Image (cartoon, rainbow, N blue to C red):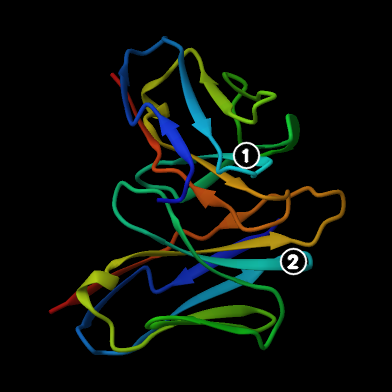
Amino acid sequence: EDQVTQSPEALRLQEGESSSLNCSYTVSGLRGLFWYRQDPGKGPEFLFTLYSAGEEKEKERLKATLTKKESFLHITAPKPEDSATYLCAVQPNLSGGYQKVTFGTGTKLQVIP
Amino acid sequence: DSGVTQTPKHLITATGQRVTLRCSPRSGDLSVYWYQQSLDQGLQFLIQYYNGEERAKGNILERFSAQQFPDLHSELNLSSLELGDSALYFCASSVGARTEAFFGQGTRLTVV
């Protein structure tokens, strides 16, 4: 069964203090790894899709990277508005268009002014 | 705004009742997914439809059912509700069956 483990569960940063969130995964052939941001009581907001080891994607202060066993979400000089729960999810590479995405439980990030 | 619309936003109902949650996907998206998110748990995949056909089932209870209509909107029916069914229910949609999904704002269901 596919598994996604995110660490740390919670992270508190001072504004401007860069850090990384980790997503370790086990999947029977990876088709895609997704990062989402979720604010309390809201739906997850899509950030990135990574497909193969070595791939990197950036958006503003966020940069996602992928290896064969884990992904990192690097946050550079975070601002209070970056406070949210960040979710990682994996999609297996199965035939027939079957898609069962497995989500991790997330890292709750708090950025203090 | 993701373009995925869910109604209602909030729902309070009694145990044993039946409710229907509605989802309109983004324009052009053929796949619709339903997820449940409880306080102590992450996003739990319930079911996926692609162009009107069921494609994948997750941990969906027998008391729950869903369908996707010809106009591609979807409904999730929850019956014989229990206190433990209280949760946020999210709908998501994607262009294909194997691409990133975009989520609606959810329906918060409270069973009393």
Q: Answer yes or no: do the residues labelled 1 and 2 have beta carbons within 8 Å?
A: no
Using the image, name the chain to which the residue with label 2 belongs. A
Query: Relative to B13, is A55 above or below?
Result: below
Q: Position of residue B3 (x, y in %)?
A: 47, 46
Query: Relative to B95, is A72 above or below?
Result: below
Does A17 sit left or right of A102 as displayed? left
Q: Residues within 10 Å of mark 1 (few under 14, many from 20)?
A: many
Which picture quadrant has residue B14? top left
Which residue is nearer to you in this view: B81 or A31? A31
Does B70 sit left or right of A103 as displayed? right
Q: Residue furthest right?
A: A95
Query: Relative to A100, is B71 above or below?
Result: above
Q: Secondary structure at mark 1?
A: strand
Residue at the (70%, 74%) spot, across then down: A51
Does B26 sit left or right of B11 as displayed? right
Q: Residue furthest left?
A: A113
Q: Residues within 10 Å of mark 2 (few under 14, many from 20)?
A: some
Residue that label 1 marks: B32
Q: Position of residue A93 (x, y in %)?
A: 79, 62
Depth check, mark 1 against mark 2: the one in front is: 1
Residue at the (44%, 17%) spot, across then down: B81
Q: Which of the image's four quarters has the C terminus of chain A?
A: bottom left
Using the image, name the chain to which the residue with label 1 belongs. B
Which residue is nearer to you in this view: B74 or B55? B74
Which picture quadrant has residue A48? bottom right
Q: Which of the image's four quarters has the N terminus of chain A?
A: bottom right
Residue that label 2 marks: A31
Q: Amino acid at mark 2?
A: Arg
Q: Amino acid at mark 1?
A: Val
